[in-house]
């Protein structure tokens, strides 16, 4: 089979390429450059120009064909502009989920098909299965990776059946140490290279500086809300999912000014660093932002009630089912395991579908439910669907 591997310059995609070649496939390495600007990028974080060099070294070592494609314009339009737009609205997007949906399994996939690819492989720690239903239709499942410490299925929670029909995840059954061992045994240049961090294809950034490319700094006030504020005393039945999904409506009258900031759109719920306010017994955390009034609300301590909520809401147009056969109908309720951020342990919850969208009611209050992030729900190891948190 002719398979194009997205060689990123990291160890995971390198080993993916090696394994496919060992299986007898015709393997082609394709490196994509998606970002050129270094504004806000922290030095020493494996800059993108090194990535291509490592990708080429791996392709040469494996004796496979190597190609390069520049997708920076599509990345800017589909991922970075979306990021700016969401932060401007006071929401917190997840660029890695978007990058997989819009770039790796869309634009990049199309480039791979131009090279005659029958399948496209990546170095993600996840798995794919397929089955044929009673009508002869093939369905594709997205499963968690076998390594619980590296499972990346959350980042792929927006993929479609068509995208999965082309996808291959050769290292999905392996543990990270095994991947490193294989790379060392095969003397791949990426064997000891550290994993990438930060924004997909951009790297680690000073977020306010990065965002100031489009969003101007603007001084505003930081207000502290005490934990006993009546704003957190939601008097409603535990099954009143609509009331429980509402964000806390904080105002400056609910607390007192304790400092200033340079732009409410630079902060996100649950954030601890970057406030510049010390002298406290416990750390201060962001519990709310108001980009219209340019106010940041904070609370002291990791157990502050303003950090925790029991439910969230996803708009109808933002609900995504990996297999449409799983789609819920209005009035239907199901129990799934849910996570609202990468690496968060799966949380038991009830999904409730109604005319206003999908509500997720957790068994226990969740820390840092944040508009703009993705919630993904699982049935065992299978990712069933996902959606952008509205509130």
Image (cartoon, rainbow, N blue to C red):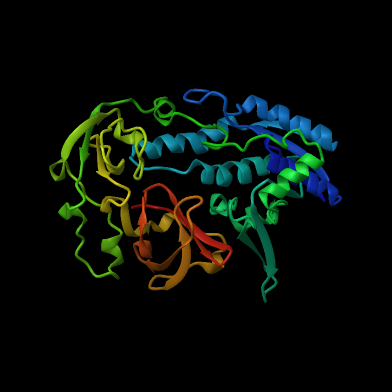
At 36% across and 50% down in the image, what residue appears?
Answer: 368
Left or right of 47 in this view: 291: left
Against 243, residue 168 (above or below) is above
Task: Pick out the residue farthest to the left.
Answer: 253
- Across and down, in percent, residue 78 comes to 51, 38
* Observer-nearest of 118 and 341: 341
- Across and down, in percent, residue 193 comes to 67, 34
Against 17, residue 241 (above or below) is below
Q: Is residue 4 visible?
A: no
Left or right of 125 in this view: 43: left
* Observer-nearest of 183 and 293: 183
Q: Is residue 167 visible?
A: yes
Left or right of 142 in this view: 290: left
Against 153, residue 211 (above or below) is above
Left or right of 262 in this view: 229: left
Against 42, residue 304 (above or below) is below
At 34% across and 44% down in the image, what residue appears?
Answer: 269
At 28% across and 33% down in the image, what residue appears?
Answer: 278
At 43% across and 43% down in the image, what residue appears?
Answer: 93
């Amino acid at each position: 089979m002719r398979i194009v591997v997205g060689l990123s310059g990291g160890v995971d995609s390198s080993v993916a390429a090696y394994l496919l070649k060992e299986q007898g496939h015709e393997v082609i390495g394709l490196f994509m450059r998606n970002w050129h600007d270094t504004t806000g990028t922290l030095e020493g974080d494996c800059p993108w120009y090194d990535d291509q060099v490592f990708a080429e070294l791996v392709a040469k070592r494996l004796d496979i064909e190597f190609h390069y494609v520049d997708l920076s314009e599509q990345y800017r339009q589909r991922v970075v502009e979306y990021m700016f737009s969401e932060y401007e609205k006071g929401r917190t997007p997840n660029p890695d989920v978007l990058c997989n949906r819009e770039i790796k399994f869309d634009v990049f996939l199309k480039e791979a098909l131009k090279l005659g690819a029958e399948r496209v492989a990546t170095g993600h720690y996840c798995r794919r299965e397929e089955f044929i239903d009673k009508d002869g239709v093939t369905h594709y499942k997205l499963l968690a990776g076998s390594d619980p410490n590296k499972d990346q299925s959350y980042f792929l929670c927006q993929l479609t059946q068509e995208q999965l029909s082309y996808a291959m995840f050769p290292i999905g059954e392996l543990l990270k140490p095994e991947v490193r061992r294989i790379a060392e045994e095969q003397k791949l240049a990426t064997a000891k290279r550290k994993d990438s961090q930060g924004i997909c294809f951009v790297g680690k950034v000073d977020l306010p500086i990065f965002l100031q490319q489009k969003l101007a700094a603007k001084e505003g006030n930081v207000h502290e809300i005490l934990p006993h504020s009546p704003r957190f005393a939601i008097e409603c039945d535990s099954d009143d999912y609509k009331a429980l999904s509402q964000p806390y409506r904080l105002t400056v009258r609910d607390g007192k000014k304790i400092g200033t900031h340079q732009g409410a759109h630079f902060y996100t719920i649950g954030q601890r660093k970057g406030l510049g306010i010390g002298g406290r017994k416990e750390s201060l955390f962001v519990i709310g932002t108001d980009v219209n009034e340019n106010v940041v609300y904070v609370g002291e301590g990791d157990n502050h009630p303003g950090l925790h909520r029991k439910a969230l809401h996803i708009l109808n147009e933002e609900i995504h089912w990996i297999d449409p056969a799983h789609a819920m109908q209005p009035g239907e309720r199901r129990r799934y395991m849910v996570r609202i951020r990468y690496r968060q342990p799966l949380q038991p919850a009830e999904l409730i579908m109604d005319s206003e969208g999908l509500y997720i009611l957790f068994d226990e209050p969740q820390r840092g439910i944040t508009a703009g992030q993705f919630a993904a729900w699982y049935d065992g190891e299978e990712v069933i669907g996902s959606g952008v948190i509205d509130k």
